[in-house]
Image: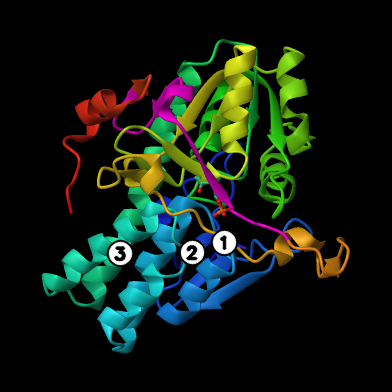
Amino acid sequence: MQPSTTASSAFDTSAHDTLRALQWLGDRLHLLDQRRLPFEEAWIDCHGSREIARAIRDLVVRGAPAIGIAAAWGVVLAAQRGDDLDDALATLRAARPTAVNLMWALDRMRVCIDAGMDGEALAREAQAIQAEDLAANRAMGAMGAALIQPGSGVLTHCNTGSLATSGFGTALGVIRAGYESGNIARVFAGETRPWLQGARLTMWELQRDGIPATLVADSAASHLMKSGKVQWVVVGADRIAANGDTANKIGTYQLAIAAKHHGVKFMVVAPSTTVDMATPSGDAIEIELRDPAELLGYAGRRTVADGAQAWNPVFDVTPHDLIDVLVTERAVITQPDAATVRAVFGMPDTH
Ligand code: MRU
């Protein structure tokens, strides 16, 4: 399954970390199609920036860091083909609105284009973005796992693993590292309605990598916390505002409220590429609304009475005062707020 022509660092794997879902093949991006997991491991090849934008929009590739990396490769493909780069950048940027990693990666590629880099140099930049993400994940895994008391149970939400990043994962990286160190003894994954990232992707990824996990309905989370089986909720992020407010998969906010009520600690794990100092607070984060059809049926089959309507926001914002710790590769920030985030990431941008 793993092609031999890709950069070796991307395949620097270990026993509990075997999956790489974005693979650059020199003239195309090879993507594990996340719409078809867990029962089909189908790969698709994207040959141009428009195909990559479509793959991001349609959730072939998803997860904040992964869509940033895919977009960077989209710019490389546009350059290789001699496409209009302004047009390619705009199309990729419009693919999804909430995860700032997408905009961050495109801004970084834009700087390179403006500096006159050719296709080969742009490819080296995209490769660097991908490799830096893997290194950040490994660092955050160790930092986050060290905060968890030996023998703990954790609950995670959505999919934040190798499918959602260049590899290893953010919150799932902490779970990988914590499982290896023994600090994490039990893993629970919420199913993550309506797209089932937890049920379809996280459970598959953990099972494949030999980390036992138990699936729970999203609506079982408070009951689980009350039972005493979990000491931490560990989640990723799509955009972290300058005051620490954090957008992540819909349902994260209610987990943070329930965790506070039950004395369960709440950890957000995200690379610095997810921190957006230009967004002052969560109120300014655009929340993606997706097709109500995702709620009104499953796998092409309608499950709700004809004529019924649905509202389908796919992210929510957890206020910073519900977050105990924010783990980035630069630092662990306890009680994130405007001051503690500024101490690590500098003054808010004002553009
Ligand atoms: O809609 P998705 O599946 O792209 O949403 C993904 C999430 O919300 C993840 O928690 C987040 O992107 C972090 S992934 C390391």
Identify which residue is drawn at 51% across, 67% down.
Answer: 56
Tell me if residue 177 comes above or below residue 163 in the rendering.
above
Q: Is residue 270 left or right of residue 125?
A: right
- Tag count in the figure? 3
- Spot occupied by residue 33 in the image (x, y as percentages of width and height): 63, 66
Q: Is residue 7 visible?
A: no
Give how far apart the Cα atoms at labels 1 and 3 are.
Answer: 27 Å
**Mark before the other along the chain sequence, 1 or 3:** 1
Q: Amino acid at mark 3?
A: Leu
Color style of the picture: rainbow
- Spot occupied by residue 202 in the image (x, y as percentages of width and height): 67, 44
Nearer-the-camera pick, 167 or 154: 154
Give how far apart the Cα atoms at labels 2 and 3 are.
Answer: 18 Å
Q: Secondary structure at mark 1?
A: loop
**Mark before the other along the chain sequence, 1 or 2:** 1
Nearest-to-viewer mark from 1 and 2: 2
Q: Amino acid at mark 1?
A: Gln
Mark number displayed over residue 2: 1
Q: Secondary structure at mark 3?
A: helix
Bin the neighbour count of mark 2 within 10 Å (Cα to Cα): few under 14, some 14-19, many 20 and up.
Answer: many
Label 1–label 2 contact, CB within 8 A = yes
Mark number displayed over residue 23: 2
Q: Amino acid at mark 2?
A: Gln
Q: Is residue 152 magenta?
A: no
Tell me if residue 76 comes above or below residue 336 in the rendering.
below
**Mark before the other along the chain sequence, 2 or 3:** 2
Nearer-the-camera pick, 24 or 241: 241
